[in-house]
Image (cartoon, rainbow, N blue to C red):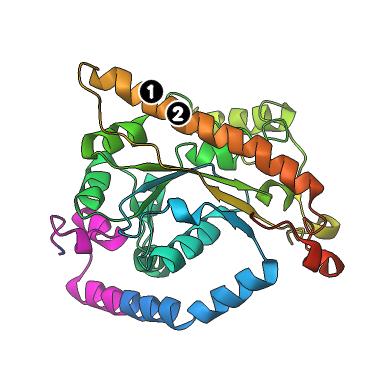
Amino acid sequence: MRDLRDPAGLTMLALMQDCAHEEHGAEERSGGRVEWLKGQFAEYQFVADFVQALRKPYVEGLENLSPDGRFLLVANHVLSGSDVPLIMHEVSRHVGKPVRPLAHWAFGQFKGFFGDMFQAMGAVVGSPENADKLMAANEPVLVFPGGAREIARGKDQLHQLDWGERKGFARVAVKHKYPIIPTTVVGADYEYRVLTTRDGAWSRAVRAVNKALGGGEAVEVPPLMRGVAGTSIRYPQRLYLRFSPPIETAKPARTSVDAWVDSVREATKAAIESSFAELLALRGRDPFRNLAPWARQRAAMPA
C-alpha cells in the first residue's frame, strides 16, 4: 500500500486501497497498467497538441500562472466535460507540471481500468486532507466547486455558477496561503442542446423515481439534451478559456479566518462571473465560434 504522507503517492489508487481489500497480485497488475497509461499519455501528447491546434481554442491569461506551479485553479464546470482536458493541457504545457484535479468522491469507487486511468491522470478524491497534501507539495491543483450540480444544469442555468454554500476551496487556500486563479471556460455549453430546465417536469419525475427506489433526495438529475441530428455527437464549438489574475489568500492581520474565507470565495466567484460576461460577448463577435473552416483566419485571438 502506498504511503499517503508522500504526495507523489497521493493518487486515486492509493486512496482506494485503504478500503478495497484487493488481492496483492491484482494490485501489482493494476499498478503496472497505471504506469503503462502514464506512458501512453506522455507519448501521445503530440496528439493533444494537434487536436488543440485544430480547434484553436481562445486562451488568455497564461502569464498569470506562476512558473513554480503553486496555484489553485478554481473553475466553472460544463456539461460535456470539455473543460477538464483543455485546462489540464494548457496549464501543463505552460508550466511543465501536470495538474492535479480534485474529483468527486464517486470516482474513488472506480476499480479496474477506469480507476487506473484516473490515477494515471493524477486525479485525487476532493477532500480537505488530500488538498492539504497536494498544497504542501506545491502542486498545481484544479477544483470545480460546482461539481455535479453544474454538470447537471438545465437550459435555464447555462453560464451560471452553482456553488451553493461551498467554500472549502477558499478555506484550504487560505490555510496554505495558496494563490487562487479564477478559471473560466465558455463555449462548451453549446456543444449540446439542453432541452430541460433544472426544476422542470423531467427533473421532478426523475427525482420522484429515485426517491421511490430508495435513492438520496439530493441526486443530480442530468438534463435531456441532444447533439448533431439528435445524436450524442457534439456540435462543433470553439472553447474560450481565461486564467484571471491571481487572488492572494494570505490573511490580513486583525481579520477573522471565517470572514477572510468568505471574502476570498466571493472575490473568486465575482472574477469568474465577470469573465463569463466578457467571454460570451467575445464569442458572440467571433466568426470562428462554430469552428467554421472558412472563418479560421478571422478567429478572435488574445490581444
| Any part of residue 21 in sight | no
Q: Residue furthest front?
A: 303
Q: Locate residue 183, reporting x and y percent.
A: 50, 45
Q: Which residue is denoted by mark 2 in the rendering?
A: 267
Q: Kindly report the distance in space between the C-alpha atoms of the residues bearing marks 1 and 2.
A: 6 Å
Q: Locate residue 154, reporting x and y percent.
A: 68, 35
* Quarter of the picture holding the C terminus: bottom right
The disc label shown at residue 110, or none? none
The magenta-colored residue range is: 3-32
Q: Locate residue 5, reporting x and y percent.
A: 13, 55
Amino acid type, label 2: Ala
Q: Is residue 273 magenta?
A: no
**In this picture, residue 188 sits left or right of residue 118:** right
* Quarter of the picture holding the N terminus: bottom left
* Image quadrant where residue 66 sits: bottom left
Q: Residue furthest bottom?
A: 43
Identified at 73% across, 35% down, the residue is: 155
User: Depth check: 35 or 180 in front?
Assistant: 180
Q: Is residue 4 magenta?
A: yes
What is the secondary structure assignment of the residue under circle 2? Answer: helix
User: Depth check: 195 or 83 in front?
Assistant: 83
Q: Are marks 1 and 2 in contact (CB under 8 Å)?
A: yes
- Name the magenta segment's main secondary structure: helix
**In this picture, residue 250 sits left or right of residue 49:** left
Identified at 45% across, 25% down, the residue is: 266
Q: In the rendered image of this protein, does residue 45 appear above or below residue 154? A: below
The disc label shown at residue 263, or none? 1
Identified at 48% across, 25% down, the residue is: 164
Amino acid type, label 1: Ser
Q: In the rendered image of this protein, does residue 294 appear above or below residue 162? A: below
What is the secondary structure assignment of the residue under circle 1? Answer: helix
**In this picture, residue 14 sits left or right of residue 61:** left
